[in-house]
Image: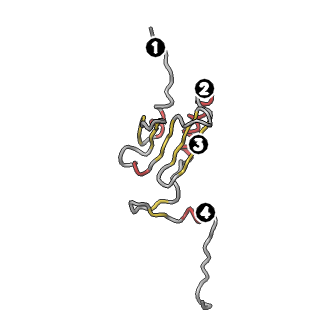
Amino acid sequence: MSDSEPIILQRTDRASRKSVQQKTKGGRGHQGPISFNRRELAQLLGMYGRKVAEGEWRDYAIDMHREKAIFSVFRRASEYPLYRIEKDPRLARRQGVYSVITPTGLILKRGHDLKNVLKVIDRKLRLVPA
């Protein structure tokens, strides 16, 4: 190393790791794990808060993987999830990024708009005339 060569330092904190692009199997790069953005989290937690107030749900979990992000809701903390709301960007041009999945693996609804997909879970009860 001579005096004319610059010294290049690499950062090792979290901010620098987020900026490194990773290649996926399809050849397209994305940055780190898939996650829910602020607007999506507001919709998910708003629905979760209503269900907690009604006494239906008691716990939730958020998992962020390389391929998809998962918001799971539980009736009790020790049980399996009642519903999984998944965000999978690989399906953006096909069925839709968001899906609601039951514990048995049945997909209740898929779509491009989270608000419309969540309507499957957040249905209001209505009085049926006799």
Dot 2 or dot 3, earlier in sequence: 2
Mark 2, residue position: 54
Dot 2 or dot 1, earlier in sequence: 2
Mark 1, residue position: 128
Q: Nearer the viewer, mark 4 or mark 2?
A: 2
Give how far across and how far down residue 103 sits, in percent: 49, 36
Dots 2, 1 in contact, CB < 8 A: no
Say what amino acid the circle numbered 3 marks.
Ala
Mark 3, residue position: 61
Dot 4 or dot 2, earlier in sequence: 4
Dots 2, 3 in contact, CB < 8 A: no
Gap between marks 3 and 4 measured at Cα: 24 Å
**Mark 4: few/some/many CA within 10 Å (<14, 14-19, 20+):** few
Say what amino acid the circle numbered 1 marks.
Val
Gap between marks 2 and 1 measured at Cα: 21 Å
Q: Nearer the viewer, residue 48 or 43?
A: 48
Q: Nearer the viewer, residue 99 or 38?
A: 99
Mark 4, residue position: 15
The residue positioned 44% from the left and 38% from the top of the image is 105
Q: Nearer the viewer, residue 21 or 57?
A: 57
Give residue 11's quadrant in the image: bottom right
Give residue 62's quadrant in the image: top right
Q: Nearer the viewer, mark 3 or mark 4?
A: 3
Gap between marks 3 and 1 measured at Cα: 35 Å
Gap between marks 2 and 3 measured at Cα: 19 Å
Give how far across and how far down residue 28 sits, in percent: 41, 61
Say what amino acid the circle numbered 4 marks.
Ala
Say what amino acid the circle numbered 2 marks.
Glu
